[in-house]
Amino acid sequence: YASLPFIEQATCNDVEDDATTCNATTADEFNKVLNRSEQAHAFLPLFPLIIRCTADFLINSIPHSFLPSTYEATIAFTAVIVNILAFAIAAVSLYDLTIFMSMRNDLATPKEDETSNNKTINYCDISKTTAELFCVNPAGVFFTSAYSESVFAMLTFGGHALAARGLYYNASSKMRNSSSNRSR
């Protein structure tokens, strides 16, 4: 049920009332559609736009025998594919952010010395464990279904990684897109 508002926004199908966000002409009509369900707020405006554009690209570039039979099914299929790719990029971005922050703050110690009995952790192990825990967390189901969490995580982790390197303009661009992915 929670992904139904997303499907409606991505396909621009009519809903029970007479206005949709695709043909709403006034702010009141737009707000009337959005206020139908509190779940609709989590998906606007970037996520449906990404899914719709990607689905249209797939429909125009891939033979129809390889795609689902209906446009709504193609939208749902596209949402899952986009989320899986965004989830993988988010995990890599988190790995990159963690290794950069660990090295910058010197949170980890050098590799084990053969003459010493002290076992130490290296930067890659910390980053790998962080990314693995992100991948296997209980909320992982939301990262592979038609929700905006994967794209949000990808943009947020990427923005933080850029900010840590001092690339503030690029980071703010990613953070802006991240914000527009989760709210209207």
Image: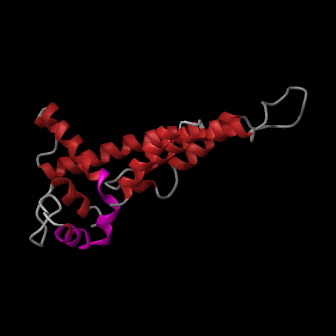
Which residues are drawn in magenta? 28-46
Seen in the image, is 164 located left or right of residue 152?
Answer: right
| Residue shown at 21% from the left, 49% from the top | 75
Question: Where residue 151 sits: x, y (%)?
Answer: 39, 48
Q: Answer with the quarter of the image where residue 118 lies.
A: top right
Q: For residue 11, which quarter of the picture?
A: bottom left
Q: Is residue 29 magenta?
A: yes
| In the image, farthest residue toward the top | 114
Image check: 70 left or right of 98?
Answer: left
Q: Position of residue 20 (x, y in %)?
A: 14, 64
Residue 154 seen by the camera: no
Residue 152: x %, y % from top left: 42, 51
Compare residues 84 and 27 and report the one nearer the observer: 27
Is 121 placed left or right of 165 in the picture?
A: right
| 106 lies above or below 114 | below
What predominant SS class does the magenta segment belong to? helix
